Image: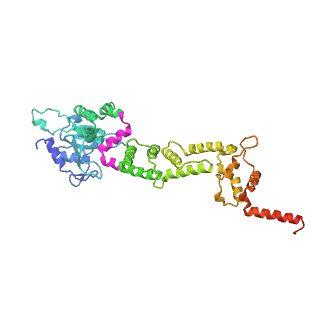
Amino acid sequence: MSDPTGDAIVAYAKSALGTNYVWGGNSMTGGIDCSGLTQQVYKHFGISIPRVTYNQIGTGASVAMKNLRPGDLVFFDTDAKRSGPDHVGIYIGGGKFIHAPHTGDVVKISSLSDSYYTNRWMGGRRISGVVTSADYDPAATQSTEVKLSKSELAETYGMSYAFFKSQPELMKKLNQAVSGQWTADHFTAELKNTKWWKDNSDSMRQAQVLAKTDPATYQANLSAATAAASKAAVEMGAVLSTKQLQKLAKNMITFQWNEAQVANYMGQYVKFNDDHVLGGQAGAAAQAIEKYSYDNGIPSSDEANKTQAAYLMRGLTSMEKIQDGIRQQAIGAYPAFADQIAAGATVKDVAQPYIQMVADELDLPDTDVDVWHPKVRAAIQSKNSAGAPAAMSLTDFRTALRDDPQWRKTDSAINTTMTAGRQVLSDMGLVR
């Protein structure tokens, strides 16, 4: 038998394409592993090589990746737990090789430009007894360099050719890399000096590469971010158009926005509905601000409360700061209770005895009397004889209430008058 050509070796190896991987297998049709494939292919042509990968790498002559020819063996270190070659295939030309990868896979063709194999490359071996086309063509060089295409080299760098095409500056670099067959490290060093690298953050670069390299995953991420943004907007009470929502989702992916940045963006779109009421968290915040102002006897407008709520949602202020501002106004309006208010009590809290007395003396429902009742406000904003702020004593306050014409119409006033009348008549001996 004459020596086989590399093309013949490759052709026979391809007859096993699709055969299931079986660890320890030697059958080109029933099941085979990586070293079993290489051994059986060479055995078919009468060439004997060892059975296992670790021994096969010691057979034949060493050959660099750039000098590979069809029929050469290619070796890789794919097991991080142990050093040395543990996977082998047969080079078929054009930067490709045929192999039996692993359990669950089949004999197939892969590319040396795949970053997985590039990063695990250990070497090539040329087995004696195999001739190549170069041996038959006197004009052919004894060493045929394997050059990776633009597409293959782009994948080696972890990016797609489509991405490079979208960036003229990087496409120029890729053309230089193809010409010089740059390594991944060389290309990365060149990449870091480009305007694109310097003008974009790491997250921005990753997003741009993903959008072109794996558009399906990018769109899935964008859809998930849009759904999350929509839910957050409803919870906050922000009303975003489809375009604004999409912009927010894109920013969340591109800039990896945190919760505070997302809230700041959505806070710009906190809107009133037809009833001029805020919804979601913004609505709850506006109501809380309104109630706190009310309980402290400080007037506030609906518009001002909603504006404060919008600022709160954007993270431009906090509820503590808003309440502190209201407390300072209350201290100015009710200086007699400055210490209590500063300590956290509301004006409603300190005015409660006056509120209750008005309800009791004037026979009013408790719900009709609060800090805003004119008599209550007059009592807690009064001054002493020296002109200093001093709340009216409860005794004086009761007396003042009973001097009011409204008190005389109450059941309490009538009963008090009748009791006093009976006492007078009793003192005169007219009744017992």
Give the residue displayed 45% in from the left and 43% down from the top: 261
Q: Position of residue 208 (x, y in %)?
A: 33, 41
Image check: 163 left or right of 390? left
- The quarter of the displayed image where residue 207 is located: top left
Residue 419 lies, with reference to residue 70, above or below; the image says below
Q: Position of residue 101 (x, y in %)?
A: 27, 48
Quadrant showing the N terminus = top left
Whether residue 75 is visible to the viewer of this picture, yes or no, is no
Q: Position of residue 267 (x, y in %)?
A: 46, 46
| Closer-to-camera residue (388/127) | 388
Which contiguous range is marked in magenta? 199-221
Residue with the most extreme front position: 405
Quadrant showing the C terminus = bottom right
Q: Position of residue 238 (x, y in %)?
A: 45, 50
Image check: 400 left or right of 138? right
- The quarter of the displayed image where residue 419 is located: bottom right
| Closer-to-camera residue (80/253) | 253
